[in-house]
Image (tube, rainbow, N blue to C red):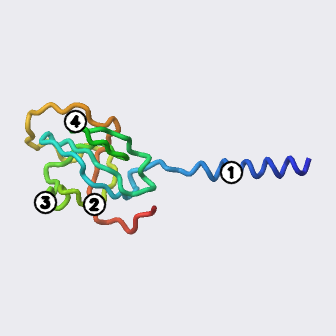
Amino acid sequence: MKRLNTLFLVLLLVIFSACESDDVSPKDCIEVKIVEYYCTGDAVLQIVTPSAQSFGETWTSGRGTTYENVFRTSLTCHFDYEAYGAGEIFSIRLNNGQGNNNDCFYCAMAVGGLPDTFSYIEVTDACDSIAD
């Protein structure tokens, strides 16, 4: 019986250690880079932070390039493309609200085939440290 209890305890420890929490919450700081951007304000971001990559999905662009760990977002009018638009890694937090897109002028292009996973974002420089 003691042997069975020990085996059960070991099994439970293995199960709990395998159940690492990989949910991303709005308070988490995540490093990303833009892999696709459209004049509609839509963008596809690739997650660089290993501990947050499960939030994203695998997606193939209209150009035939397949990306891992990506999600789509709607960028604000004041997003700094000069700083972040050329594949530069930058820090964000997920945001539950739409932000400041109401006064934006975008092109009237219809964009389809974007990743299903979506979140608004907030660009931030206030990340203390990125945990892997």
Residue at image position (45%, 55%) is 51
Identify the residue position indicated by label 4 in the image.
62
- From the viewer's perspective, is residue 89 above or below residue 6? below
Dot 1 surroundings within 10 Å: few (below 14), some, or many (20 or more)?
few
Q: What is the crowding at mark 2: few (fewer than 14 residues within 10 Å), some, or many (at least 20)? A: some
Identify residue type, mark 3: Glu
Cα distance in 3D space between marks 1 and 4: 42 Å
- Which residue is nearer to you in this view: 43 or 62? 62
Q: Which residue is mark 3?
A: 82
Determine whether, in the image, residue 48 is placed left or right of residue 18: left
Query: Do the residues under discs 1 and 4 have CB atoms within 8 angstroms?
Result: no
Among numbered discs 1 and 4, the one appearing first in the sequence: 1
Q: Label 1 vs label 2: CA separation?
A: 35 Å
Local packing at callout 3 (Cα closer than 10 Å; few below 14, some 14-19, many 20+) is: few
- Furthest residue in direction right, as rendered: 1
Residue 85 lies left or right of residue 45; in this view the side is left
Distance of label 1 from label 3 (alpha carbons): 47 Å
Categorize mark 4 by other alpha carbons within 10 Å: few (<14), some (14-19), many (20+).
few
Identified at 24% across, 51% down, the residue is 34
Q: Which residue is mark 1?
A: 14
Element on which disc 4 rests: loop
Q: Name the kind of residue labelled 1 in the image.
A: Val
Name the residue tied to disc 2: 90
> Which mark is drawn over residue 101?
none
| Coordinates of residue 38 in the picture (x, y in percent) | 16, 42
Looking at the picture, how far across and down is residue 19, in whole percent? Answer: 59, 48
Residue 25 % position (x, y): 42, 50
Residue visible at 18% across and 47% down? 100
Q: Position of residue 95 (x, y in %)?
A: 32, 48
